[in-house]
Image (cartoon, rainbow, N blue to C red):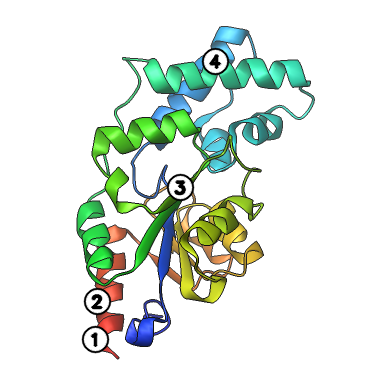
Amino acid sequence: MTAPLLPLANGELRLVVFDWDGTLMDSPRRIVHCLQRAATEIGAPVRDEASLRNIIGLGVQAAVRELYPDADDRFVERFATTYRACYLDAVDAPETPLFAGVSELLDWLEGRDVLLGVATSKSRRGLDQALEATGLGRYFVATATGDEHASKPDPSMLEFVMARAGVEPGRTRMVGDSVYDLEMARHARVPGVGVTHGVHPPGRLEGAAPLALLPDLEALLEAFRQAEGAH
């Protein structure tokens, strides 16, 4: 598993792109809370937690259409607007800490001249807010958001980050916690790496044929270190 994960020799790996929610930030509880609140506020049926966690990783409009297949465009936009307002501004929603090991992982990769990017279904405002609050913005050479690109698993946001970084698919890795991240990577011809501390369980992630599947970011860093030592 580790040998192809981080082939640093001769610069084979040049770019690592991360999903945000459920991968770098422990935000699924806040997402579920705000999806349920949005449904309540607009008078829509409230979906259970399992159904909501299932669609985390899709763009918000795509997620609403998955949850409410018969919804029209007006409903989708109203739901999305209500959800975003809750996520960005609600003071009683669950907090969104970073997962353990984020800074150590990013520092280690940056120290080896690996470029870093983000491909997330968050809105641009939501990602910028998170980058500012966490102080992580300085790490990333390119970011792409769900309101700027087609929803995952469409490859457009990952392709955008690679184009901005000037790195081809074979020298890129995509790290995410959902099958949508891994399917996006496959569509972009990028090896995908799954972490299981987010929204989708290991069995589901395995179905997307990741290059590697690890329990958390600390294990990912250790796999990277082992791969470096093997060269």
Q: Are marks 1 and 2 in contact (CB under 8 Å)?
A: yes
Q: Disc 4 marks which amino acid?
A: Thr
- Neighbourhood count class around disc 3 (C-alpha, 10 Å): few under 14, some 14–19, many 20 upward: many
Measured in 3D between alpha carbons, the distance from the residue under mark 1 to the one under mark 3, in whole angstroms, is 30 Å
- Above or below — where is 114 with respect to 201? below
At 41% from the left and 80% from the top, the residue drawn is 1
Q: Is 198 or 109 nearer to us in this picture? A: 109
Identify the mark nearer the N-term, 3 or 4. 4
- Neighbourhood count class around disc 2 (C-alpha, 10 Å): few under 14, some 14–19, many 20 upward: some
Toward which corner of the image does residue 46 lie, by quadrant? top right
Q: Are marks 1 and 3 in contact (CB under 8 Å)?
A: no
Measured in 3D between alpha carbons, the distance from the residue under mark 2 to the one under mark 4, in whole angstroms, is 43 Å
Identify the mark nearer the N-term, 3 or 2. 3
Measured in 3D between alpha carbons, the distance from the residue under mark 1 to the one under mark 2, in whole angstroms, is 6 Å
Measured in 3D between alpha carbons, the distance from the residue under mark 1 to the one under mark 4, in whole angstroms, is 49 Å
Q: Which residue is mark 4?
A: 82
Dot label at residue 152: none
Q: Disc 3 marks which amino acid?
A: Thr
Does residue 180 appear in the picture of this structure?
Answer: yes
Q: Which residue is mark 1?
A: 229
Q: Which residue is mark 3?
A: 143
Q: Are marks 2 and 4 in contact (CB under 8 Å)?
A: no
Residue 113 picture location, percent across and down: 29, 70
Q: Is 166 situated left or right of 70 in this image?
A: left
